[in-house]
Every structure is written in structure tokens, then in C-alpha cells.
Amino acid sequence: MQKVPQTTLNFNVFPIHYSLEFEPDFSSWQFRGKVVIQIDIRKPTKLIKLHTKELQIKDAQLVQNGTFGAQIHVDEPKQELQLTFPKVLRGKAVLTILFQGTHNEGMYGFYRSRYMLNGKEESLLTTQFESASARACFPCFDEPFFKATFDVSLTVPQPFTTISNMPIKKEITIAGGKKQVVFQVSPKMSTYLLYLAVGNFKYVETMYRNIKIRVYTVPDKIKYATLSLHYTKTFLQFFEQYFQIRYPLPKLDMLAIPDFASGAMENWGAITFREIALLGDEHTSVVYKQNIAITVAHELAHQWFGNLVTMQWWDDLWLNESFATFMSYKAVHDAFPEWELPLQYFEDTICNALGADQLISTHPITVKVNTPGEIDEIFDSISYDKGGSVLHMLESFVSEKIFREGLHQYLQRHAYSNATKFDLWQAIQGAYKKTTITAMMHRWITQPGYPIVMVSKSKLGFLLQQQRFTLKQKTFPTMWHIPLNYVTADGIAKTALMTQKTLTLKEQKGWIKLNSGQHGFYRVKYETKVLQQLGEGIREKRIAPVDATGIENDLFSLTIQGKYTVDDYLKFVENYCVDAQYPLNSSVSAHLSSLFRITYRKKAFREVRRVSVLFHGNLLKQVGWERKPKERNTTAMLRSMSIYMLGMAGHEATLRKASTLFKQLRTKNTIDQNIKGAIYTLAAWQGDEKTFEYFLERYKNEELPEEQRKLLRSLAMFQNAGLQQRALEVSQSKTVRLQDSMMIPMALSANPMCTLIWPWTKSNWVGLMKKYSTGTHMLPHFVHNLAGVDTPEAYKEIQHFFSLAQHKRDDIKMAVTQTLEKLDVLMHFLEKNKVK
Ligand code: BES
Ligand code: ZN
């Protein structure tokens, strides 16, 4: 067991308290800083190592029975500041460092973000430190294990608002129209959670207990802030009750930042968001509204999972991200049960994770990482969604009550400190009072991939066999302890724990449905006859929608793997799923959409298109074109999906109706937000240069983030290659913010008429590597997206291209390997199905 956490520094010097002073400059975009660190030197040494990145170190001194100047050395590749002192040091000491840094525009460290106000460009300053960018703001022990308390002071021009993790303690007016703002001391926490902001913000506020909650935006957008203010209060209360542990800070700020690399960041007491993930109003469409709620809840969950209790090292990142993913749905579901989030959790989290984890080159949830690039790379669907799925499985195994009790113990025991997965098992096992948890969970967390259970009829009942499932077929010795739930043909629900390679269920009825409720993280393969019977069960609605989705989802993966043909899959859909309910209809729709793109204009396309039109035509008939007052959120989503799919398939009536709506929209703005994206897409799909100009003009003048995103995406949906090329150019121009600059290239990969992505990537790669620095996590996303390229030539080229040293980077190693594997799978699939 890992008792001593990993570090790239030394375990001889520990920070206890940081006093930080910053003075930013709004014209040179440089800041001056001073950090005073109380340290504890536990092993005698002359050398003290800290992290630093892109800072100029001016001076370093240590006080301990006298004052000692340090010999300063910066090791840039290692991002280390090495201070050597004239004598051997031990015990408590005070280290003072003076430094200077730049407010970059790359969205990491202490960075600059721009926005418009009354026709004039303004700037604000904000920070993003996770995973390893606190060191780009001040020299520090920049690893999660080195928790300390912080006090911060910011010297800024009078009119600005300043924000940090804690409330302001005092403001001192100083010469030259400036003020020095001093914040209260923070609790013990990791460096990646520290936050600083300076700018002209507006806010709305409310109270919960004695906690002041505020949502901050740039001045023009404050009208979109009340929705999330309400969410924040609701979910904060939920988490306090669920964990039975109070939110420990006196205030909670939520900030919408105009330039933001990811979706949101959980800085303790000062959470930052991309505008689109925080701002909305009553017109916001259900997808975006749900996303705001889930994002707010996710970051609030981190205030406990991550901030109060932090993983020892990044190899247990899942302790942060999986829990936040899992808990966010719980909180939102509690407040909005009518949104049916448990069903969406299955589709968006569990199915998504099963999809990501079926590559040989996947990684276990616990993963060895060392460099900042490697750490960045694991903020992926394994750490978020697979972890979230496995937690869901564990909860359903031990019961909600015991699970919650275990979490409470875990948080209580390790508050203001760090923990590992073993601490978590111990806490849950303690509540469960049986010793099976560690053995079971350890396999799910430390082994890559997941099992498929093969079901066949035997004399004794049903024979089950487990083995690891990968799209590229290969045999592995890996085994799991699988908690099984199943129903028999007479509707009786049962459970079993499969700990061996095989297990016989002594059931004599015609069929069983394994993984009932779909709480388990595994796939199932049935014999053809059983599958048929299950299909009939689906058609006659004897099988619950979520179980039906599980069956269909597994069948689709087996089709991509090559165990079934595309025809088999399409027949299954046509025979059994045409009248499906949510989430089955949504799952089928997504799979037809992906087949549609893969086979586009190839031989197999005819049949895919036929079934897709049949399926979506029926779906659209069910849900109708018009939004109904009390309809399910998912109905709104399905409506837009079926309009899109029918339109893309060239379905005349749909295209006509879509054009009419588009014309209406151009004259008066009356169209349902929920289908707007689809209507734009189809307008672009059928559009010419004039339509392109129309979207571009509107994009330039739009201030609402949701609308901006729809307009930007539509620029990528033209059939004409010249316009696609222009879209790429626009995406890299000043017109589009850095944070959104990958939206067009990514959307183009979904455009079946686009073949530009790989050639464009190739010729722009060196520039792209510069543009998307490691701290932003953007480049790995982009690489994953290349899996849409589907010719054998491109595969070889991509492989060769990324094998060259000058094209490599630490944070895309895994993304490249996984993309190549996906392409390889795709080529085999195309061959096997004679898609040509
Ligand atoms: N801790 C992350 C933010 C983050 C992401 C930091 C990547 C460093 C690298 C935050 O809690 C998060 O997970 N944000 C998500 C949104 C969430 C709703 C899934 C994101 O940014 O995508
Ligand atoms: Zn998170």
C-alpha cells in the first residue's frame, strides 16, 4: 500500500503558511509578487526545492537565527526553483522570495481575459491553477499533498473589485489611486485551489445560513446570473445535508470568466466557469440549462471531494473527479426529479465510459502519472465517467444508506488533509461491515477495461463466463468481482456476486436479463436465440427502457467489434426498437448517427440511411415539431436530434419545414431554443456563401454564449469545401476566442462532407502546439477528435506523423495511441462490413 505519496520535490521541507502579495499592472501585463513561506525543514539540508514556471526570481532569503541569502538556480525543464543556503538548515524557518511574472493570455496561471463594455475592450485578471500552474503565479510546493494556509494581498487600482478564496479582511488606500486589499486566512488547502481575481465585476447575491453566495459576471452579463445563483443555494444545501458536514467557508463566489480553458474550476470559495456553463435565463434551452445545473453541482461537490479531502497524488485524481461527477447528478436529481437525471446518467456517464474503456490502450482509473503533461492527460472520460460508473455500481451494491455513511466517515476522517483509495475502501467497508469491498473495488480501480459476460443456456440453467471486452479482439487474463443483478422471464429480480471466471445461474425459464437496472459496469453477450427473445421483450415493452438500452448498447459495440454485422444491428433496430422510449430511443439515435457518418456515401450507406429515416421519422412523429408545456426534457432533445438526422439524410419534408423555420427566425426571433441548433445546422448544410456570411455576421455581434456556440458550430456544417476551409480560417482568427477556437475543427469532424481535418491538422500542427499550452487540456481533446478520419492512408500517415519527436508532447501521448487504435478498429469494421 502506498503510504508515502509521490513528489517531484523532496519530502524534507514542508510549507505551513504562505503570505502572498501581488501587484498587477494593467498596462505592462506584468505582476510583481512577494511570497513569505513558513516552512518546516524535517531533514537537515542546504537545498530547498520549490516549483516555478515562467517567473523571474528576483531574490530569496531565509530567516532562522539570522538571515541567509540563497544561491538561486532555476531548472526550467523541471519547473524547479533550487535554493542553496550557506549552512545546513533544520526545523522551522521563514523563506521570502521576490519575483515577477506575466499575465499571459493562454488561460493558465494568473492570466488576462478580455471582454467588451460599451463598445470598448476591457480586461480582467483571473487564475487557473489546476493541475500545475500555481507555480506560474508564485514559487510554491505545487503538489496536492503540500497543504498549507494562505493569506493573500492584492494591490490594485481603486475602482477594481478583487476576489480570492476568503472574504476581504481589510482595504488600505495607498498612493497613486491604488488600494491594498487583504484577505482573511484560508483553511489548510492545496496550492491548485488558490484563487485570485481583479476586474470590473458585477454580482447578484443571496444568503444560505450565514454564507454569502454571489454570482459574478462582467457588467453586461449580470442579467443572466440569477438562474445559477438559485442553483448554487439549492445544491449547497443538498450537499451539506447529504454529507452531514458543513461548508466551512464564510462565503461562496461563482464567477463567469469570458476566457476559460475548461468548463469550470472548483477553487475553494471562488469557483470559476466558462460563461456558457454558468449564465442563463428562462429562455435557455434544456440541454444548456441542465449543463449549468450539473456543472454548478459538480464544482460544489468538489468543495468536499477535492477541497476538504484531497487525493495524495494525481494518480488518484478519480477521488476528485469521479465523485464530483457522481454527486452532481444526485444533487440535481434531488432538486429537479422531473429531469430524470438517473436515466441521463446512464446514457451520458455509464455508456460513455463503456465506450471509452473498450480500447486496449485505455488506462486504469488509478494511473501512474509524473509530469504536468501526464497529469493533464488523465482529465478524461475514464477519470470522470468510468470512476463515476464504478461508484454508482458500488453504491447499488452496498445500498445508498451505507454508501453515504461511508462517505461521511471518509470526509470526516481526512478533512483538511489527503487521502488515497485505500482510505475510501476502509471507510465504506467500515460502514458495510463485510470485508468484500476492498477486493472487489481494487480490481475495478486498478485494472484497465471491464468485462463482458457471455450468457449461454446449459442443462443446469444459464452459464455465465467473464472476460475483458475490447474492440480489438484479444485475450486477457484479467478478472473482476462483478456484482450481478438479473431478472428472469417471470419478472423476478435476483442478485449474485461473480468472483470466478464462470458462474452457473440455476434458472429454468426461457430467458434472463443480466445487469437489470444497468448499475453494473460490464457488457453482456447473449446467444442469438436469447437475444431474439429479449428483442421481443423490448418491442412489447416488457423490458424496462434502461435495460433495453443496455442490450442495444452492448449489441452496437459488438457490431463495431465485428461479432455482429451492420445488417444484424439494423435489423434489431428495425424489428424491436422503432417505438422505443427514452433512453433507448436516444441511444439508437446516437448509434445511427455514428453509422451514418462512418458509412456516408459508401455502399452500406443506403441501408443505414433507410433505417435512420424510418426510425427518426417515427420518433419525430411521436414527439412532434412543437414544444409542449410539460414535456420531458429528453423529449426536447430527441426532437432536435430527429430533425437533424432526417435533414442530414435529405428527407424532403423535414428540410422544407426546417427552411421555413429558418426564414421565420431571420425575420422574427420566434423559434424554440431547443431546436435552433438543428435548424441552423440544416440551413448551413443546404446553404451557400450568403448563408455563411449571415452566420458569421451574427456570430460577431452575438453576446449570449448559448447562441454564440450554435452560430459558431453552424459555420462548420456547410457541404462546400471552400466554405469549410473558410470556417477553419475563421476559427483560428481573432474573431473567435481561444477558448472556442477548437469548436469549428471539432464540429467539422462531424460533418460527413468534410475531408479537410487531417490535412489541416498536419500543416498547422506546430502552430497548434504553441497555441494550446499544456495547462489548458485542449490539445488532447483535439487529437481524440481525429478518430473521425477513416482512410487507411490517413491511419499510416497519422501514425508516422506523431512518431516524429518534433510532433510529440507529454499531454497527448495517450490521446495519440487511443486515436490510432480507434482508427484501426474503424478500418477493420469497414472491411468486415464491406462498407466500401
Ligand atoms: N477540476 C476540474 C477543472 C479542470 C479540468 C482542471 C481539467 C484542470 C483540468 C473541474 O472540476 C471539472 O471537472 N470541470 C469540468 C466540468 C464538469 C461539469 C464535468 C470541465 O471543465 O469540463
Ligand atoms: Zn471536477
Image (cartoon, rainbow, N blue to C red):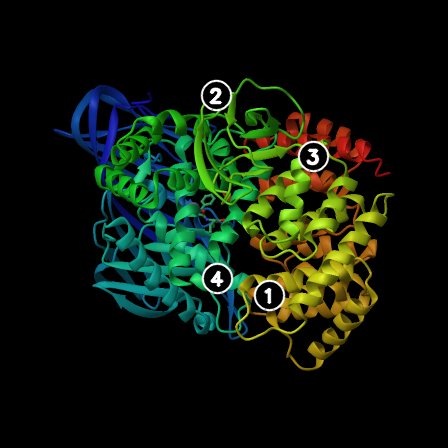
Rounded to the nearest angstrom, the CA distance separating label 4 from label 1 is 11 Å
- Report the amino acid beneath label 1: Ala
Query: In the image, 399: left or right of 455?
Result: left
Rounded to the nearest angstrom, the CA distance separating label 2 from label 1 is 44 Å
Query: In the image, 499: left or right of 792?
Result: left
Where in the figure is residue 72, as x and y percent of width and height? Answer: 34, 28
- Report the amino acid beneath label 4: Trp
Observer-nearest of 778 and 239: 239
Write down the residue under mark 4: 339
Picture residue at 69% right of the left edge, 34% below the top: 528
**Which residue reaches farthest left?**
65
Write down the residue under mark 2: 500
Q: Quadrant of the N terminus?
A: top left
Where in the figure is residue 763, as x and y percent of width and height? Answer: 74, 40
Contact between marks 2 and 1 (CB within 8 A): the answer is no
Mark 4 or 1, nearer chain start = 4
- Report the amino acid beneath label 2: Gln
Judged by depth in the image, the label closer to the viewer, 2 or 4, is 2
Q: Quadrant of the C terminus?
A: top right
- Report the amino acid beneath label 3: Thr
Rounded to the nearest angstrom, the CA distance separating label 2 from label 3 is 24 Å
Q: Secondary structure at mark 2?
A: loop
Mark 3 or 1, nearer chain start = 3
| Above/below status of 158 relative to 731 | below
Q: Write down the quadrant of residue 799 in the picture.
A: top right
Mark 2 or 1, nearer chain start = 2
